[in-house]
Image: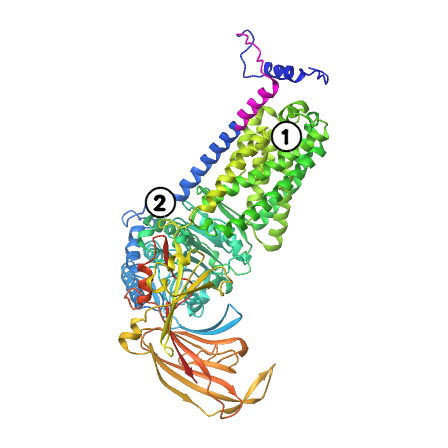
Amino acid sequence: MTRNQNDPDADDRRLEDATEESPLLQPAGALVQKPDSRPATALINQGSWRRMAGVFLLMAISYAVIGAIVSYKRLSLPAPKSVADAVGPHDFSAEWAWQHLEQIAQKPHPLNSRENLRIREYLVQTVKDLQKEAQLLNRTIELGDDNIHLTQTKNYLGNTTRLEYYESSNVLVRVVGTDGRAEGSLSGHREAVVVDAHFDSVLIGHGATDDGIGVSVCLEMIRNLINHPVKHNVIFNINNGEEVGLYGAAAFMKHPWAKDVKAFINLEGAGAGGRALLFRASNQALAKAYSKDGSSPHANVFGNDIFKLGLIKSGTDFSVYTDSNIPGVDIAFYSRRAFYHTLHDDIEHTSKGSVQHMGNTGLTTLRNIADSDYLIKPKHIVSSEASIYYDIAGFFMLTYSFSTYLTLNYNLLIIAPIFVAWAIISSAKHGLTLGVVLRSYLSLIISFIAAIISSVIFAKFLDRVNPMLVYGEHWLGFMFFVFQCCTTIICVQWAWVHLELWLRGDSFGPLEIALERIRVDSEQVANVGMVLFWWTLLLGATLIGRSQQIGLFYFITWFTVTSIISAYFSVYPRRRVMALFSLCALNCVMPLIPTIHRSANFRKMGQVSFFLSVVLLISCCIVFPYSAKEAPNKLVWRQIHDLDKDTSYVTVKTVNNLETIMDMVPAAAKKRKCSPDPVSNGALNQCVYFGATPKLVVESKKTGFEIIKSKVSAPEHHKELIGETQVESKYLLRKVHLKWTAVESRLCAVQFPSNSGLVSLKLAGFEDPDEGYRTPIVDAAIHLGMTAFKRDYDQEWDLEVAYEVENKDAPALEGILACLYDEWDNEQIPAFTDMKNHLPKWALLGGGKGPGLLTIQKRVLV
C-alpha cells in the first residue's frame, strides 16, 4: 500500500491492512468480522499495553525461573554420610566429622584461654588414636613437634610498629603417601601438599564455622587417607593463633616440614555454614584440581581478584603461604555473613550438610593434587599463570587459563564490528543505517553513564538515611536499584526515539503512531547498538585484565556473546520470540534495553518503573535493617582496667543505633560519652562508659599481673649504625630487665612513647639466630613496643629494654605494661555479662579484630 501524506485516515487504513496480514487471524473463508471503529490511537494504545504487559510477564517468568534454579542449587546441601556409607576413596563422612565439631565448638576458645588448651589436647589425642588405626593397616602417620618461637614486626594503623613474640602451639600431622618419604627414610619423595585450618576462635564466637568445620574436615581427611592412601605426602597444619594475626601459619613456615610443601589447601569460614566457596586459586592447575570429579562445585574468581587489587585488606592463612611463593587454594564459607565473629558462630547456626559440602570439595581437591605429578614437577615447569574459574549455577564449573580468556576476548573484539557491519548491510532496506546504529550506541553509553550517576546519588542518599540497608535488607535495596536504573534507562531511550523521529521529520503526534509511520524497528536497532556497547566494555575489561592479570570481568565476555546472538535473531522477524527469550534469560541489566524497545510504550513503562522506584525508595528509607534471625547489629566490645587510677571503662562500637542500645544497658544508660570512632575514621560510632571491675582484680586482690623486679644496669657507651658504618653514639645506653608474672593470661604487652629513645627489646627464651635474639628498632620514632604470646600459663616474663639517655642521672623510661584476658563465659568479666544480658534481640556482641576482651594495665618505670 502506498502511503498518502495528505490522507488523514491513512493511519487507520494502514493498521487495518496490517491486521489482515496477521498470521494469528482465521484463514480465508472464515467468518468475516466487522472492522473496528475505534481510532488508531486507541488501537495502538491497547496494543502497546498488551505488548508491555507481555514483556513484563516474560521478564518476570524468565527471572523467576533462573532465580529459582540458582537459589535451589545455592541453598541445597548434600546429605551427610555416615562412616558406613563413606567407603570409597572420594567418600567423606560428615557424621564422623560432626562428632569432633561438637567437641571443638562447645565454648569460645580464643588463643588466650584455658579452653584453647583443652581443644589442642583433644586434637592431639584424636591424632594419636588415628595413628593406632593406621598402624593396623601398615600406614604411617607422624605427629610433628611444634616448638617454634616466632619473632616478627607488624605495621598497624597510624604508621606504628610493634614487635611480636609468639610461641607456637600448632598440631602438625604428616600422612606419608605410597610414594612418599617418612621421617628417617632415604627413599621416596619428600614433596607434600599441606591442608591448613585453625582451631582457635575469636573472643566471643564458639568457632563452629570459623574454623571448627575446617578442623573437623581435616580429621576426617586423615581418616580417609589412612584407608585410601594417596601417592604423595600430605601435611595437616591444624594451627593456633590465626584470629590474632595469622601466627600459626607464619610459625609453620619456620618448621622443617615447610620446605617440603609445594601446594596448600586452606579451609576457612567467614559466615555461618552454607556452601563452601572456592574463593582463591593461585593457578589453573590447582583450580582444575578442585573442579575435576567434584560434586556441586561452587567457585568464582571474583574473590581472587579483589584481593589481588587490594580492595580487601584483611587476610587468611592463604596470604602467608603465597608470600612464601607456595601456590594453593582457599575454600571458605560465606553465607549468613552477619553471624561471622559473633555468638551465633555455633553448632546451632550451621549444619551437617555444610560439613559434607566442604568435605566433598576439599577431599576431592586434596586427592587430585596428592595423586598427581604436580608436586614433584620442577618449579620452572609448573605454570604460575592466573586462571579464570566459576561455576554455572552449581551444576558444573568452567576453568581456563588467563591467556585463553584474553584470546577469546581478542576474537570477540574482531567479530563484533564485523557482525555489526553485516547486520547493517542485511537490514539496510528496513532503515538500519550506520548513523542510526551509532546514535543507538551513543544512547546506550549515555544510559549506562546516567544509570551509574543516578545509582551513586541514591547510594549516597541511602547511606545517610539508612546506612545498614544492604546489611539487613539487601534484596530490597537491590530491587530499588534495579528499578531506578530501569527508570533512568527508559528516560534516555525515550529521548533517543524522539530524536530519531525528529531527524526523520515525524516528531508530531503520539509517539506510538509516529513509530508506526516510520516503520523503524527500534528493538532491532537497540540490539545491534547493544553489540557495540558490550564491545566497548569488553575492550576496557581486556585492557584492565591484561595490565592487572585479573579476570573478574569474565561476565562481560559472555554478555558480548549473548548480545551478538540476540542481535542476530532480531534481524529475522520470524525469530523474534527466540531473540526476546535470549535477551530476558541471558542478559540481566543493560541488555533489557532491547526488551524495553519491544514494548513500544516508553511513557507507560517509565511511569510504572518510576512508581515502583518511589515505593521501593520509601521502603528503603524507613525499613529497620536489623533482625534477630538473619541480620543482628554486631557490636565490638572492649574493657580496659587501669590499676593506677582504679578505673574500668568499656568501649562499644558499631555502625548505628548505638545510643538506642546503650539506653538498655543499666551501667551505660545514665552516664556515657559517644562520638565517631577515630580508628575507623568515623565509619563506626563508639560509646565509652564506666563498667564493673573485673572479678579477676576484685577476688584475687592481685593486680592482674605482678611485677617481680626491675633490674637496671649502669648506662654505658655504645655504637650506633649509620648507613653501613658503626660510629660511637653521643648517647649512653641503659639496659633494664623487667620481670613479671601474669594471672590467667598468656598474652602481655609493653608500650612506650614514641620519643623514648628505644634501641632494642628482647624477650628471654626467644634466642632465634635467624630472626635475631635482639631485634633492633629500625625507627624508634614510630615504635610503640612489644607483644608476646606464651604457650603455657603461669610463666615468668623477662624483657630486656635498651634505650638511650643523655647522662647517667637521666630519669627512668616510663611505659605501660598490660596483660590481656579473653575468657568471659566464667563470668570473670561482669561488665561483659551485663551488656550481653541487656541487649535487644536484634543486637549481638561480636569479637572484632585481635585479642584482648579485657585489658588490665599499669604504668611502669624502667
Q: Look at the picture and state if 635 lies above or below 783.
A: above
Q: Position of residue 70 (x, y in %)?
A: 44, 40
Q: CA distance from mark 1 to mark 2?
A: 48 Å
- For mark 2, does the 10 Å Cα neighbourhood hold few (<14), some (14 to 19), or many (20 or more) residues? some
Q: Position of residue 730 (x, y in %)?
A: 57, 89
Looking at the rendered image, the quarter that the C terminus falls into is bottom left
Residue where numbered disc 2 is placed: 78
Label drawn at residue 522: 1
Which stretch did the figure color magenta?
31-52
Image point (29%, 68%), residue name: 828
Looking at the image, can residue 177 be seen? no
Viewer-side label of 1, 2: 1
Residue 451: in magenta span: no
Dividing the picture into quarters, in which one does residue 121 lie? bottom left
Label drawn at residue 387: none
Identify residue type, mark 2. Answer: Pro
Q: Position of residue 763 (x, y in %)?
A: 42, 80
Looking at the rendered image, the quarter that the N terminus falls into is top right
Secondary structure beneath label 2? loop
Identify residue type, mark 1. Answer: Ser
Image-based side of 583 in relation to 752, left or right: right
